[in-house]
Image (cartoon, rainbow, N blue to C red):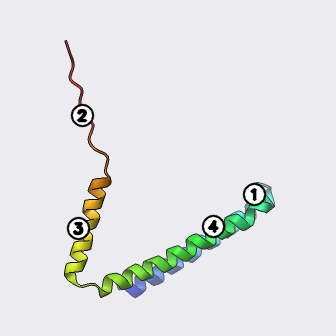
Amino acid sequence: MTASSTLHFWFQLMGSVAMLAVILTALGLMMGLVKLADIPRKLGTLLGIVILSTILPGFLISAWARMSMWQQIALAAFGVILLLMLRPPPKTRSKRKG
């Protein structure tokens, strides 16, 4: 699977998710579950999420393709180290007295 077909699939998926969210918002409005005053805020949030989720992968894939191999390895190692640092420390067992 190439990067362009992956991005094409991602754009189609995001379009489907956005359409489903708009339909659910409209149904919620018709059933009285969503207030009319909340719709612009919800649609604005949805639009922001869709825009970010379509632009960000394209940027990351193009940046990753332009990196040399040693930069990719260093970035992957940095990510692994960061994940290990953010992981909570293991709990120590308390010793029983008695």
Task: State yes or no: discs 1 and 3 in contact (Cβ < 8 Å).
Answer: no
Q: Residue at x 31, y 46 (%)?
A: 88
Which amino acid type corresponds to the residue marked 4 in the rendered image?
Thr
Asked whether disc 1 touches disc 2, contact meaning CB atoms under 8 Å apart, the reply is no
Image location (x, y in percent) of residue 22:
68, 69
| The C terminus, quarter of image | top left
State the residue at coordinates (44%, 82%): 58
Q: Of label 4 and label 2, which has the lower sequence position? A: 4
Q: Position of residue 25 (x, y in %)?
A: 71, 64
Identified by mark 2, the residue type is Thr
Q: CA distance from mark 2 to mark 3?
A: 28 Å
Q: Are marks 4 and 3 in contact (CB under 8 Å)?
A: no
Give the distance between the C-alpha atoms of the residues marked 1 and 4, in whole angstroms.
15 Å
- At numbered mark 4, what does the secondary structure look like: helix, strand or loop? helix
State yes or no: discs 1 and 4 in contact (Cβ < 8 Å). Answer: no
Q: Which residue is label 2 attached to?
A: 92
Mark sitting earlier along the chain (1/2): 1
Mark 3: secondary structure: helix
Q: CA distance from mark 4 to mark 2?
A: 43 Å
Q: Which residue is mark 3?
A: 77
Q: Quadrant of residue 32?
A: bottom right
Is disc 1 surrounded by few (<14), some (14 to 19) or many (20+) residues within 10 Å? some
Of the 4 image quadrants, the one containing the N terminus is bottom left
What amino acid type is highlighted by mark number 3? Answer: Ala
Q: Answer above or below: position of 76 versus 3.
A: above
